[in-house]
Amino acid sequence: MRLSTPYYLIDEARMLPAMERIRLVQERSGAKCVLALKCFSSWCAFDFMRQYLVGTTSSSLWETRLGHEKFGGETHGYSVAYADDEIAEVAGYCDKIIFNSLGQLNRLGHHAAGISMGLRLNPGIGHSCSELSNPVCQYSRLGVRAEELPEDIGSRIQGAMIHVNCDNDDLASFCSQLDVIEERFGKLLPHLQWLSFGGGIAFTDEAYPIDDFCRRLREFSQRHSLEIYLEPGEAAVTHSTSLVVKVLDVVENEVPTLVVDAGVETHLLDVLTYGYTPEVDGAEPLARDAKDLGGRAGHVYRICGRTCLAGDHFGNYVFPRPVALGDELRFPNVGGYSMVKKNYFNGIRMPAIYHRNLSGELRLVQQPTYEDFREALTNTHLV
């Protein structure tokens, strides 16, 4: 059956390798893994994913509630800043709640009485693909530095979260972080029951040295008598989800440009934010900033979206064959930070979301309508 484009397709069979790696890491390291909902919150897949992850971690009240209601297991609540009128509700959903600053902990911590309370720490060292996503950049507001901690902090919290990675596939880099954490927070660690290393660690990649990773985690856990958590987001859904689009027009200029029925800013926002080129099935990606795209074997195209943004540009690619009007193109690795960031800019059709389970059964889980677009910004009620 040919589905109407554009659409996202979440495929459990393609998600399975990452899930199995997550299971393996938990078994060998003793660490627990919770899904980072900020990256992927399409709960149509939660029945499958809860077989491998022990729960969820969140960045807001609504994510916390979603994890509690739709995933179950452990629910970890975190926010850069909780509002006074939401903290009690957040605490009601959580098994563990993590405050970002001493100010928030001091002012709102009493709402978390009876659940395990944590504080985000900033060790001043991390690994990021971009300064935009660097949690330990200059003037960072994310977490508390060692020199800022009061002497009695170990008696006031049960755990901590240290999230300093983004797209980190370098085990040596992660191990050096552990050394710095031990050096800078050595006095605090004996007072804690649990420690989360956050997300951004690419341990589900096939080339990642998973045995050494597990050994290092287990050694750290045993040395400090800590329960360790990891918060995979991208690592949990890598290669699991496609965005399928159709060519609506071919604009002939210096390089033929394929205009598709989706947009970068609307449907793959991180491509625009971080300036990378997403994979396309059956095509070879070229540099985004290439000045000369001619003189190559094959058929070179720019793929662009149909919004009015001049820079609505997915990337430059070489195809082994000509691409024609009506052809479908497939971006095969868009599970992370795509569906959670999609928006109605230009009012173009929002992609449907399909879900295929391990048995191969395909179901439509969301078909956005004009009414969804219409009501997104104005749905008038008397107050």
Image (cartoon, rainbow, N blue to C red):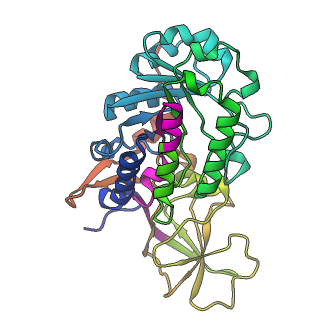
Viewed as shown, does residue 213 lie left or right of 359?
right
Foreground pick, 22 / 273: 22
Q: Nearer the viewer, residue 44 or 127?
A: 127
Rendering quarter of residue 33: top left
Q: Is residue 350 visible?
A: no
Residues shaded magenta: 219-247
Task: State the residue at coordinates (53%, 32%).
Answer: 224
Residue 275 higher or lower than 49, as above or below: below
Q: Where is residue 339 in the image (x, y as percent from the top left)?
A: 46, 48
Q: In this view, does 346 lie to the left or right of 365?
A: right
Where residue 192 sits in the image (x, y, percent)? 53, 24
**Image coords of residue 369 (percent x, y):** 38, 45
Residue 76, image x, y percentages:
45, 28
Residue occupying the point 67% across, 50% down: 128
Q: Quadrant of residue 271?
A: bottom right
Asked if 182 appears above or below 276 in the picture, the reply is: above
Q: How many labels does the image show?
A: 0
Look at the picture and state if 333 lies above or below 41: below
Magenta stretch: includes residue 203: no
Q: Nearer the viewer, residue 102 or 172?
A: 172
